[in-house]
Image (spheres, coloured by chain):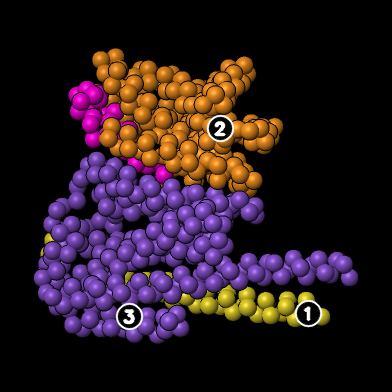
Chain colours: A yellow, B purple, C orange
Amino acid sequence: MTAGGIENFPYLFAAYAAVWIALFVYLLRLQRRNRELEEEMRELRELLRR
Amino acid sequence: MARLLPAATCGTMLAALWIVFMVVPNEREMGMVQRIFYFHVAAFWAAYLGFFVVAGASVRYLWTGSRTADHLAEAAAEVGILFCTVGLIMGSLWARPIWGVWFTWDPRLTMTVILWSIYTSYIMLRAFGGDDEAVRRWAAVLGLIGVLDIPIIMVSVRLLRGIHPAVITQKEGGSGLADPWMKVGLYVTAAAVLLLAGWLIRLRAQSARLTEEVGVLRQEALARGGAA
Amino acid sequence: MHAALAILRKDLDIEWRTREGLSTVFVLAVMLLVVFAVAHDLPPDEAPALAPSVLWATFVLTGLLGVQRGFLLERENDCLAGLLTAPVDPASIYAGKLAANVVVLGAMQAVVLPLVGLFLHVDMVPALPGLVVVLLLGNLGFSALATLFAAVAVRTRAREVMLPLLLLPLVVPLLIGAVVATRMVLADGLGAARDGLTVLAAFDVVFVVAGWLLFTYVVRD
């Protein structure tokens, strides 16, 4: 069970990198989707008003 | 209060990262790889939170037909699975240097994989179940059944051939947290991750609500267009 | 209660009259057994260790198809809609269908058990009473969830694959309990299987009740 040391740094890095990338991508995707939907909603409301 | 969520999340997250990487000492036996532990555990807390929210929202939906509850369930399932997957990946990357294997069928891990499968099937049902209104109800039933299964899963996986060395469980469970800063690190990280999960659920639920509203507006526009 | 029994009788009647369902399920089970036995290809002294898992894997996979079929037939003729317009409580429909599935799957188990004994060189006879108990408990729990979700699956777009997708993750604990209990019963008799039986019993109680209460939400239109 002795695995201490700098040689395991790649695992540590990979773990945090994978996680952060995944979360960021998801967050940005959600925000973009919501923006698009709000945009579409505005357009449709305009259309219906006429 | 909701407005503060992004800021609070970012703030806590920075604090957590600082503590985990700068303050906490190197763990005696596992070395620096042990730092994965903080986010790994926090991710699963977020996942479980998500699954229980799905169950609660499902019950609410079945009881009252509240659309908000339905959107919440949809969102919590997706975010829950996201954090569950994240937790599994981190666990695997921690296990490889420490145990020598990328994966093992020990009780805790088996249970996590089963839960992951249940909520993935929930998402599949919502995605591919068709456009019938009834899909919401069916998904709610599944969400509730999933949570009812949890205690039974916990008991059943203990029957599996246990190969998980106790010393690892202890470490995972926290009795290996020698330094007080480690406890602080865990709690701050958990807070940060839970806030993040909350933020993502809120965004996703909003997405569901907007999709529904846009759908309604589209129908109306088509109808009008036909009339004209 | 009457309604449930009536539905049970109707479903079993249909199964018996055509015999299509029963025979295809039986043959399928046998074929699966052959696949498992051949895929492992173990010598007679090692094969018995495989019996519990092969028994239950076959049961689950055949059971999925058997239950699904029952609901597909209903759907084709819109029987369920007809049943619901009658003053029949959905919970009774559930009870009736659950009972019918238990009977059909039980018959399948009766065919599979001796064949597992034959193909994997296991003497089932000494442990028979214990095995029957385990088979029954496993059957009941599986059928409880399968009946509930088959009603969902046959209405969805991806219907062939939806039932396994929904059901398999949920029944894993049942599978674990059943396999462990079977292994213990074959080794040391019913008393040794207490842990597995506890899991099975808990599963059965929780999901028969849950199915009973929730079926109405699934079929309401």
C-alpha distance separating marks 1 and 2:
49 Å
User: Seen in the image, is C114 located left or right of residue B159?
Assistant: right
Asked whether disc 3 touches disc 1, contact meaning CB atoms under 8 Å apart, the reply is: no
List the residue tagged with mark 3.
B13
Relative to C64, residue C43 above or below = above
Q: Residues within 10 Å of mark 1 (few under 14, many from 20)?
A: few
Mark 2 belongs to chain = C
Relative to C86, residue B154 above or below = below
Question: Is residue C192 on the magenta stretch?
Answer: yes
C-alpha distance separating marks 3 and 1:
44 Å
**Residue A7 visible from this viewpoint:** no
Mark 3 belongs to chain = B
Relative to B136, residue A27 above or below = below
Q: Residues within 10 Å of mark 3 (few under 14, many from 20)?
A: many
Mark 1 belongs to chain = A
Relative to C204, residue A21 above or below = below
Q: Farthest residue toward the top? A: C125
Q: Position of residue C38 (x, y in %)?
A: 40, 28
Q: Position of residue C97 (x, y in %)?
A: 53, 30
The dominant secondary structure in magenta is helix
Q: Residues within 10 Å of mark 2 (few under 14, many from 20)?
A: many
Asked whether disc 2 touches disc 3, contact meaning CB atoms under 8 Å apart, the reply is: no
Q: In the rendered structure, find residue A49 and report the number of the disc placed on it.
A: 1
Q: Amino acid at mark 2?
A: Ile
Segment colored magenta: C170-196
List the residue tagged with mark 2.
C93
Question: Is residue B149 on the magenta stretch?
Answer: no
Q: Farthest residue toward the right? A: B228
**What SS does tag 2 mark?**
helix
User: Seen in the image, is A34 located left or right of residue B101?
Assistant: right
Residue that appears at 57% across and 67% down: B208
Q: Amino acid at mark 3?
A: Met
